[in-house]
Amino acid sequence: MKHIEPNPNADLSRLEKIFWEYNIPDSGKSLYDFVLGKKEIEYLDRNKVMARMLTTVGWYNLVDIFGLRDLKSFLKDDTLKWIWPEDLRNNYEYAGEILDQTIS
């Protein structure tokens, strides 16, 4: 299956745009490391940041940046509860089910 692993050349600057209405000083790499649990950012909530990424960065961009294996962690109830458009939340729940069945 393609895209299981992240693209090492993915443009992480796309992640910097998730907080377009705030002045968040973190780089795309910093946010990337934060959501993967490699770094702590005390003023951010990991699940809320992952939900924000799901709603503002295109799905295929996220697949490119994180790979499907890591994106599975985005599609859990603790994250999806922060996505308020119900249709979008339902689509991501379904995607999570598919990824659970196909990626171990």
Image (cartoon, rainbow, N blue to C red):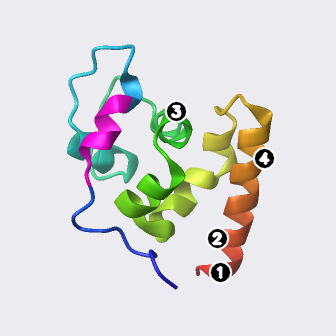
Q: Which mark is residue 102?
A: 1
Residue at the (73%, 31%) spot, across then down? 85
Q: Secondary structure of the magenta portion, mostly?
A: helix
Q: Is residue 36 above or below residue 19?
A: below
Three-letter amino acid code at disc 3?
Lys
Q: Residues within 10 Å of mark 1 (few under 14, many from 20)?
A: few
Q: Helix, strand or loop at disc 3?
A: helix
- For discs 2 and 3, the disc positioned in front in the rendered view: 2
Residue holding disc 2: 99
**Residue labelled with disc 4:** 90
Q: Secondary structure at mark 2?
A: helix
Left or right of 93? Residue 82 is left
Q: Position of residue 96 (x, y in %)?
A: 68, 61
95 or 50: nearer the viewer: 95
Q: Which mark is residue 52?
A: none
What range is drawn magenta here? 11-17
Say which of marks 3 and 4 sits in front.
4
- Spot the residue most to the top: 22
**In the rendered image, which quarter is residue 26 located in?**
top left
CA distance separating discs 2 and 4? 14 Å
Question: What amino acid type is highlighted by mark number 1?
Answer: Thr
Give the amino acid type for the residue marked by disc 2 in the picture: Leu
What residue does disc 3 label? 48
**Separation (CA) of disc 1 from disc 3:** 26 Å
State yes or no: discs 1 and 3 in contact (Cβ < 8 Å): no
| Crowd around label 3: few <14 · some 14–19 · many ≥20 (10 Å) | some
Rendered-image quadrant of the C terminus: bottom right
- Earlier in the chain: of badge 1 and badge 3, it is 3
First reached walking from the N terminus: tag 3 or tag 4:
3
